[in-house]
Image: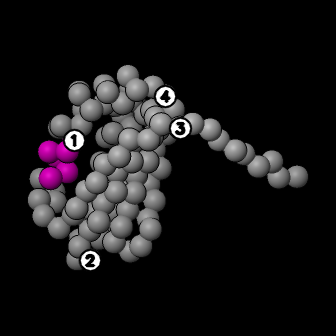
């Protein structure tokens, strides 16, 4: 499994709009590409968000980055031309430990 992680740091005046846009528009549009099996949206502090996109294969992530990311990134930038810093990382899952609760 490949994890593509995007972290957003928003200016305080934009926090509500950024979260609303991510949850109602941006993430659903990315999910509709069918490149990812699961998407998680998390908040670390009032102005810091992380989205974790789970792709089954590197080919799925490559397809997203090639065919979909440029347009979706442009669309996001139109809504937030300033005030949001973005970092992106790709992680390769090595192992999972699960706890079974009884």
- Across and down, in percent, residue 21 comes to 29, 57
Secondary element type, mark 2: helix
Decide: marks 3, 2 in contact (CB < 8 A)? Answer: no
Identify the residue shown where x is 46% and y is 59%.
42
Q: CA distance from mark 1 to mark 4?
A: 21 Å
Q: CA distance from mark 2 to mark 1?
A: 23 Å
The chief SS type of the magenta part is helix
Q: CA distance from mark 3 to mark 2?
A: 33 Å
Q: CA distance from mark 1 to mark 3?
A: 25 Å
* Residue labelled with disc 4: 56
Part of the protein shown in magenta: 72-77
Q: Which of marks 4 and 1 precedes in the sequence?
A: 4
* Residue labelled with disc 2: 12
Secondary element type, mark 4: loop
Residue 37 visible: no
* Residue labelled with disc 1: 72
Decide: marks 1, 3 in contact (CB < 8 A)? Answer: no
Q: Which of marks 2 and 3 precedes in the sequence?
A: 2
Q: Residues within 10 Å of mark 4 (few under 14, many from 20)?
A: some
Labels 1, 4: front one: 4
Front residue of 8/88: it is 88
Front residue of 19/55: it is 55
Residue 41 circle label: none
């Amino acid at each position: 499994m490949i994890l593509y992680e995007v972290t957003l740091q928003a200016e305080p005046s934009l926090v509500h709009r950024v979260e609303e846009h991510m949850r109602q528009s941006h993430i659903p549009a990315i999910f509709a590409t069918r490149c990812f099996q699961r998407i998680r949206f998390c908040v670390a502090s009032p102005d810091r968000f992380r989205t974790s996109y789970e792709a089954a294969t590197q080919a799925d992530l490559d397809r997203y980055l090639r065919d979909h990311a440029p347009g979706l990134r442009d669309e996001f930038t139109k809504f937030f031309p300033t005030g949001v810093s973005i970092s992106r990382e790709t992680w390769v899952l090595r192992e999972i430990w699960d706890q079974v609760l009884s």
